[in-house]
Image (cartoon, rainbow, N blue to C red):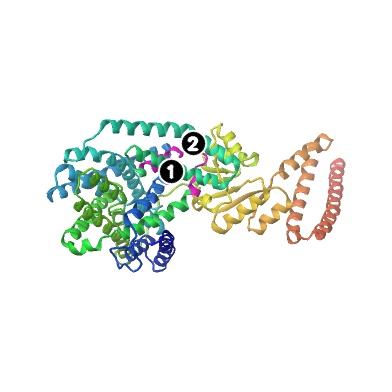
Amino acid sequence: MSILVQICLFLAAAAIAAPVARRLGISSVLGYLLAGVLIGPFGFGLLYQGIDVQTILHFAEFGVVMLLFLIGLELRPRRLWTMRRQVFGVGGLQVLVCGLLIGLAALASGLDVARAAIVGGALALSSTALALQLMDEKGHLTTRYGRGAFSILLFQDLAAIPMIAIVPVLAVGSGGVELSWLDVGKALAIICAVFVIGHYALRYVFKFIAETKVREGMTAAALLTVVGVSLLMEIAGLSAALGGFVAGALLADSEYRHQIEADIAPFEGLLLGLFFTAVGMSLDLGLLLREPETILPIVAGLLVIKTGVLWCIAKYVLKLTENGPVRLGIAIGQGGEFAFVLFTAAAAAEALSQSVVSMLVVSVTLSMVATPILFIAYEAFGRRGGRVLEPFDAMPEDDGHVIIAGLGRFGQVVARVLRAKGIHFTALDISPQHVDFIKRYGNDIYYGDASRLDLLQSAGADKARAFVLAIDDVESSLKTAEIVRRHFPDLAIYARARNRTHVHRLMDLGVSAIRRETFLSAVDFTRDVLIGLGSTSKEARRAIDVFVRHDRKRLYDDYEHYTDEEKLLANAREAHEELEEIFQRDAEELAREEDKKTDK
C-alpha cells in the first residue's frame, strides 16, 4: 500500500470516526478505537493491506508527546504549588496503592519482585489522553471530580518519568542488561543542558520570530521545540514523552505561551486521534480469542482494583458526593499509553518476556476500549437521583478572570485598576516589542493575536467574566469583536473605539458597552479651558454636560445612516445648529437665574 493511500486511510478514519461517534452519542475516542479495530490487521481487515501497525503506533505516540507538551505548558510553578495537595498527595496515594495491589497480584501470578514492580507501576498509570478527552466531551473537567481526576493524571504523568528511567535498574535484578552509569551521567548532562539552554534561549528565539510577523514561523518554532527536546531525551536514553513535557515546562512562563498553545493544539488533536486509531489497530483479537481465560481476568482485575481504589480516594479523601466517586473511578480506571512505553522498554531491557508484554498490551488496550463503554452504561443506567454533575466549587463573584485584548495606553489603565483590585486578567497583545517592554515591569501579558478563535479558547474565553477590547487597529478590533460575539455570545464585551464610525461598526456586531478613547478626556480638558477663560465652575460644568448629552444623542441618531455620507453631513449641519440653539437657551436661562439672585 502506497504512503498516500495510507495517509488517505487514516485521515478518513479521523474525519469520519469522531463525527459518527458523536452523532451516535458515544465518545469520539471510542469511535477512533473502533475505526482502528475495523481497519487493523487483527480486526475485520476490511481495509487493511499490510500497514505496519507498530510503525504507525510509534509515530502516533507523538500525539501523546504533544499532549504532555500542552500539559507542561500549563504547569506554571505557581499553579503546581497551589495544586500540590491534590497532585502530590492524592495522586501519589493513587499510584502507590494501585501499584502495590497490582504488583502483589502480579507476584501471586508467578512473576518475581522486579518484574511485578514493573507491571504494578505500569498498570497503576491511566490514559491521560483518553480520560481528558472523555471528560472534556462531557463537560466534566470543571466539576470537582474532573479537577480531582486531572490532578491524579498530572501526578501520573510526572511519575511516569522516573518509572521509565528506572526500568533498566529493575532489569538488572531480573537478569536483563547491565546498567551503564556512563549512560546515566549522559542522560543527566543532556537534561541539564536542555533546561539551561531552553530557559535562556527559547524566549529570545520566539521573540525574534514574532518580530518578523511570519505566522507559520511561530508554528514551526513550536513544533521544532517539541521535536528537538524530545529527540535529545531519546538520545539520553529517556522517553520522547518526557521531552514533550520538559519543552512545555520551559515555555510555561513565556509571554508567547498562549500563541504557542493555539498553534500546537490542532496537531495534538489530530495526532491523538491517530494514536487511538493505532491503538485499536494493535488490538490482537487473535490472542484474545486464543487466551480469553487469561486476558479477560487481567482486564477485569485491573478495572476492579483501580476503580475501587479511586472510589475510596474520591469518597474519603476528596470528599466527593453523589456521582463523583463512581465517575472518577470510571474515568481513570483503565490502563494508559505510558504502559505501552514501559512494557516496550521492559521488553528491550529483557525484564519482561515478549509473550507477557503482548498479553499485557492487549489487556491495557481492552481496558481503554472498555472505559467509554462503561461511561455510556453508567450515564444510561447507573445515575442516582437524576443529578448529572457534581457541582463546581462555589467561587466569589469577583474571582473571575478578565481578558484584555490590546495592552497599549488605553488597555494599561484597565489592567492597572484590575490589578490593584486583585481581579485576575489575561492580557494579549500582538506586538512583541510591546510585550517585551511591559514584561520588564512585572505585568502579565502574552504575545498573541486576539482575533484568533483558537487563541481565545487557549486564554479561557469560555470561562471569562468579561472581555476588554482595547486593540488600537480598527479592523483588528472589529474582527476580534466579531469572533468573540459569534463564539462566546454570553461573554460581556467592553470596547474601546477610535472614532464615531468605529462605534457604529461595533454596534453592528451587537456590542453596546463602548467608549471613545479620547472623548471623555477631551471634554474634561475643555472644561478646564472654559474655567481658564473666565467661566465659573458651574457654567463650565453645565456647558460640558449639555454638550455630552447632545453628542451622545447624535451618535446614536447617526447610527441608522452612518454609511450614508450625504445624510451624515446633513445631520452634522442640523446638529451644529441645534447645539448652538441649546447653548443660547442655556445662556439665557443662566442669565435669568443670576437676575433672580440679584433681585433677592
The one of 452 and 360 positioned closer to us in this rendering: 360
Mark 2 neighbour density, 10 Å: few (under 14) some (14–19) many (20 or more): some
SS at circle 1: helix
The residue tagged 1 is 226
The residue tagged 2 is 202
Tell me the chief SS of the magenta region: helix
Residue at the front extreme, as displayed: 2
Residue 291 belongs to the span the image colors magenta: no
Quadrant of residue 57 in the image? bottom left
Q: Picture coordinates of residue 68 (x, y %)?
A: 39, 46
Q: Is residue 130 visible?
A: no
Mark 1 neighbour density, 10 Å: few (under 14) some (14–19) many (20 or more): many
Residue segment shown in magenta: 242-263
Location of the N terminus by quadrant is bottom left
Q: Picture coordinates of residue 323 (x, y %)?
A: 31, 58
Total labels drawn:
2
